[in-house]
Image (cartoon, coloured by chain):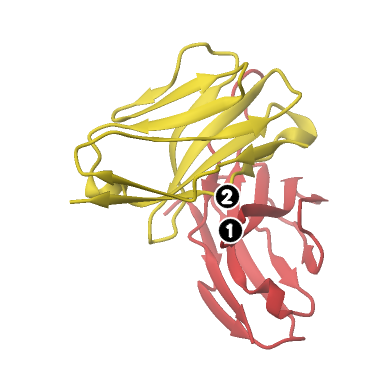
């Protein structure tokens, strides 16, 4: 079974600074998808960024980028120029490509606070 | 408006009572999911459905029942609620992506259930 590990329960960053959230996963599959979801206090789950395992290039969405290390099974999220609105819980998630593995497995999440 | 909705948003019930949480999506997505979110556990999959009349267990199915007679609805029933089922419940949906593609999984706003 696939597992996703987020070992840091909490992190804090100064506004306008850069922060990196860590995530590791375990799988025997060679093709899969990885995601970062944001959950603000409203509880709504918001997709931040996704990465296809077959793509070597790291995904980027505006101030959000990932460092995908397939061999190390590592998938970290970098938030640049942090804003107060980035304060939220962030979940790393894994999904296999098809069949029984095509459902999201989440890490336990990390709470990010942004200091003004 | 198109989207995925859950009802009720908040529910308080007593131990032993039957409770049904509703989920409705307007996109005709093939896949639908139920998760529960608990502090320290992230989101854990309860049940999922790949199409109408096709359902399967997730990671934590005990004490829950689902049905999917129509593509757009995926109700979750707690047959005899227990205190350990106090949680926030999220419904999600995703379309069946074309071969080689992937699709975003969309989440409902969540239902906070308290079992006294």
Q: Which mark is residue A108?
A: 2
Residue at the image point whose x is 48% and y is 37% from the top: A36
Chain to which mark 1 belongs: B
Figure check: B80 above or below A10: below
Report the number of discs: 2
Percent x, y of residue A98 = 73, 28
Quadrant of the rendered image containing residue A100:
top right
Percent x, y of residue B87 = 60, 69
User: Does residue A15 appear anywhere in the picture?
Assistant: yes
Q: Could you give the CA–CA distance between mark 2 and mark 1, rounded to whole angstroms?
A: 6 Å
The reply to whether discs 2 and 1 touch (Cβ–Cβ < 8 Å) is: yes
Which hue belongs to chain B?
red
Residue at the image point whose x is 75% and y is 56% from the top: B68
> What kind of element bears circle 2?
loop
Which of B7 and A75 lies nearest the eye of the viewer? A75
Residue at the image point whose x is 48% and y is 35% from the top: A22
Say few, some or many: other residues with alpha carbon within 10 Å of mark 1 (under 14 / 14 to 19 / 20 or more): few
Percent x, y of residue B44 = 66, 53
Figure check: B44 above or below A58: below
Q: Which residue is mark 1?
A: B40
Figure check: B18 above or below A57: below
């Amino acid at each position: 079974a696939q597992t996703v590990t987020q070992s840091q329960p909490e992190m804090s960053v100064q506004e306008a600074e850069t922060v990196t959230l860590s995530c590791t996963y375990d799988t025997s599959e060679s093709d899969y998808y990885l995601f970062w979801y944001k959950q603000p206090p409203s509880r709504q789950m918001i997709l931040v960024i996704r990465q296809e395992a077959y793509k070597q290039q790291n995904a980027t969405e505006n101030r959000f980028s990932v460092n995908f290390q397939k061999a190390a099974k590592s998938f970290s999220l970098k938030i640049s120029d942090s804003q107060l609105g980035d304060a939220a819980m962030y979940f790393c998630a894994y999904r296999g490509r098809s069949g029984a593995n095509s459902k999201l497995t989440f890490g336990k999440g990390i709470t990010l606070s942004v200091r003004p | 408006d198109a989207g995925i909705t859950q009802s009720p948003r908040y529910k308080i019930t007593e131990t032993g009572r039957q409770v049904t949480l509703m989920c409705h999506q307007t996109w005709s997505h093939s896949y639908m999911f139920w998760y529960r979110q608990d502090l320290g556990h992230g989101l854990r999959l309860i049940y999922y459905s790949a199409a109408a009349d096709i359902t399967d267990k997730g990671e934590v199915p005990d004490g829950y029942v689902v049905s999917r007679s129509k593509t757009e609805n995926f109700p979750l029933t707690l047959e005899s609620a227990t205190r350990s089922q106090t949680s926030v419940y999220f419904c999600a949906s995703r379309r069946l992506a074309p071969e080689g593609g992937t699709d975003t999984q969309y989440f409902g706003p969540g239902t906070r259930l308290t079992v006294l």
